[in-house]
Image (cartoon, rainbow, N blue to C red):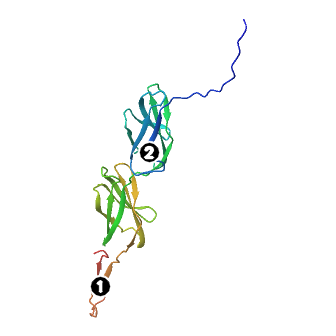
């Protein structure tokens, strides 16, 4: 049996009929100032296969982060445990034929809302310095866990815990702090375990010296006998 004529070789490029998906939020280069990222995407069935979209999956830094099964595709991503800095997000759309289309990878910067502390004022009463600090949580639903005051190179001054938002007064015992100029810093932590620091605040610590006077004998008096009783009067410096 003979063979028939052969056709010329043809180059064939198969078309992979995958859906199209585009990330609409966040945009490339965006800064996210929250611990929740409201990610969104649009997905379109392949124009040839016309297979419906089954799901859109999101991948944060290459790891699965969440899904949505209905349009419009939106997923709130909890980023409380994600460190601040640059991250990537990509959307995958799967159709009824289990064919997957992928969006471009979008980079964004995460900067979660951190608590703030501001040293407002100081007032000295004897050996105690009253320090007023304004502490605010990173977001309205958070609370202040603790505020710690340190001075100079991180030396502990005083701390308070479970504080309300706003101004609080800290009583710093300066008896064992060297006299002179010092720098105070307030560090705050909120219920989301996020922390912040105040700007340095310059203070001066002074130590009043005690006063000694002789009560008896009085000045200019005449003493008789071989012994003179002397009675000093000591006034503490912080009186």
Q: Position of residue 176 (x, y in %)?
A: 39, 67
Q: Is residue 229 visible?
A: no
Q: Nearer the viewer, mark 1 or mark 2?
A: 2
Q: Nearer the viewer, residue 80 or 128?
A: 80
Q: Quadrant of residue 218?
A: bottom left
Lateral position of residue 52 relative to residue 13, left or right: left
Q: Are marks 1 and 2 in contact (CB under 8 Å)?
A: no
Measuring 42% from the left and 30% from the top, which residue is drawn there?
53
Q: Dot 2, crowdedness within 10 Å: few (<14), some or many (≥20)? A: few
| SS at circle 2 | loop
Write down the residue under mark 1: 214
Q: Position of residue 68 (x, y in %)?
A: 39, 34
Q: Nearer the viewer, residue 118 or 213?
A: 118
Lateral position of residue 137 relative to residue 60, left or right: left
User: Would you place residue 69 above or below residue 24 in this image?
Assistant: above
Q: Nearer the viewer, residue 129 or 41?
A: 41
Residue 82: numbered disc: 2
Measuring 32% from the left and 62% from the top, which residue is drawn there?
134
User: Considering the image in quadrants, where does the C terminus appear?
Assistant: bottom left
Measuring 34% from the left and 49% from the top, which residue is drawn there?
191
Q: Position of residue 102 (x, y in %)?
A: 50, 36
Give the mark, 1 or 2, whose residue is nearer the N terminus. Answer: 2
Residue 91: numbered disc: none
Q: CA distance from mark 1 to mark 2?
A: 69 Å
């Amino acid at each position: 049996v003979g063979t028939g004529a052969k056709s010329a070789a043809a180059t064939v490029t198969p078309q992979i009929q995958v859906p199209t998906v585009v990330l609409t939020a966040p945009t490339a280069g965006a800064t996210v100032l929250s611990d929740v990222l409201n990610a969104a995407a649009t997905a379109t069935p392949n124009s040839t296969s016309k297979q419906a979209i089954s799901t859109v999956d999101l991948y944060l830094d290459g790891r699965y982060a969440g899904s949505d099964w209905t349009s419009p595709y939106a997923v709130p991503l909890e980023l409380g445990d994600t460190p601040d800095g640059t991250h990537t997000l990509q959307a995958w759309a799967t159709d009824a034929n289990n064919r997957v289309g992928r969006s471009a990878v979008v980079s964004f910067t995460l900067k979660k809302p951190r608590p703030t502390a501001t040293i407002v004022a100081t007032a000295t009463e004897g050996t105690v310095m009253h320090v007023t600090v304004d502490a605010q949580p990173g977001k309205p639903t958070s609370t202040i866990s603790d505020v710690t005051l340190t001075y100079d190179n991180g030396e502990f001054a005083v701390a308070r815990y479970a504080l309300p938002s706003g101004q609080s007064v800290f009583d710093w015992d300066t008896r064992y702090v060297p006299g002179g100029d010092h720098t105070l810093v307030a560090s705050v932590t909120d219920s989301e375990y996020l922390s912040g620091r105040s700007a340095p605040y310059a203070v001066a610590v002074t130590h009043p010296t005690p006063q000694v006077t002789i009560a008896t004998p009085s000045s200019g008096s005449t003493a008789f006998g071989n012994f003179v009783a002397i009675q000093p009067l000591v006034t503490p410096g912080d009186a």
